[in-house]
Amino acid sequence: MVFSNLSNVCSHLQNASRARLSLTSIPMTKMHLALCLALQKQGLISTLQVAGRKPPTAELGEDITLESRESLENELAEQPWLGMDYQAASNDGVATAGLSLPPDEVLRSQARSKTLSASVYKSVGVPVNPAHRRIWLGLKYWDNEPVLRSVQMISKPKRKITAKVEELRRLVAGKKAGIIQPLVNPGECMFVSTDIGILEAREAIERKRGGLLLVRTG
């Protein structure tokens, strides 16, 4: 069921990009969210936000000047996690994905899997019912061409393919590893499900992690 749903997500993202949509949504699951965060980290999508069945409202701020834009770009270059709406822990609390919680409550929630109250979800525009939550993605384009041109599954429900670090090195270097075709085109990425989360193949090599080959994009 997980792989069949992921296959539908890949087809949806590919069709949405080819249709030149600026915003699209997919069902909210832990695997989908992890994959979308990995896509955003590689610059393949512009925005990511968890909301309901209706698109999230745009938050209009102050007019952006050239100086403020350069300052923001420098800040994101030094702290890229700020672009994913994550903030570092502070003495006053921890802000994660728009939900502000005190440190003690965060630790208790992690230890006991404590669910947040309905008022907290409603305050950030996230439905209380998990079945109504969707991941809204902003798609990117360059020279009138989609950045996310193709999204293809590697592993399938009846054929799960894993790769060790040595095999990932061969694929990134442009060499075939088993039945898996190498990464040869510019901007081509491969995402691997490891024991520390979903990583792009090059990041998995840096962290010396092999795993299940999920998706390749180009």
Image (tube, helix red, strand yellow):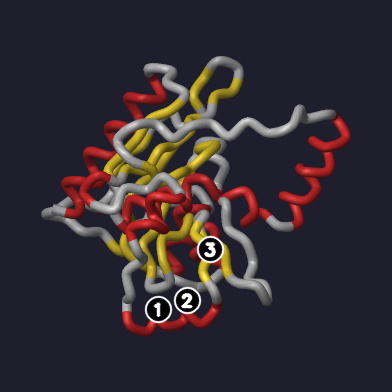
Residue on which the image places disc 1: 110
Q: In this orientation, which residue lies closer to the viewer: 184 or 161?
A: 161
Distance of label 2 from label 1 (alpha carbons):
6 Å
Q: Position of residue 89 (x, y in %)?
A: 63, 71
Q: Is 104 left or right of 51, judged from the image as shown?
A: right
Q: Is residue 11 above or below residue 177?
A: above
Q: Position of residue 146 (x, y in %)?
A: 49, 24
What residue appears at the point 83 percent right and 37 percent down from the top-left corner? 68
Q: Earlier in the sequence, mark 3 or mark 1?
A: 3
Q: In this orientation, which residue lies closer to the viewer: 8 or 185?
A: 8
Q: Amino acid at mark 2?
A: Val
Q: Is residue 150 above or below residue 110?
A: above
Q: Residues within 10 Å of mark 3 (few under 14, many from 20)?
A: some
Residue on which the image places disc 2: 106
Residue on which the image places disc 3: 100
User: Image quadrant of residue 27?
Assistant: top left
Mark 2 secondary-structure assignment: helix
Mark 3 secondary-structure assignment: strand
Q: Earlier in the sequence, mark 2 or mark 3?
A: 3
Figure quadrant of the C terminus: top left
Q: Amino acid at mark 1?
A: Gln
Q: Is 186 left or right of 197, judged from the image as shown?
A: right
Residue 167 numbered tag: none
Q: Amino acid at mark 3?
A: Ser
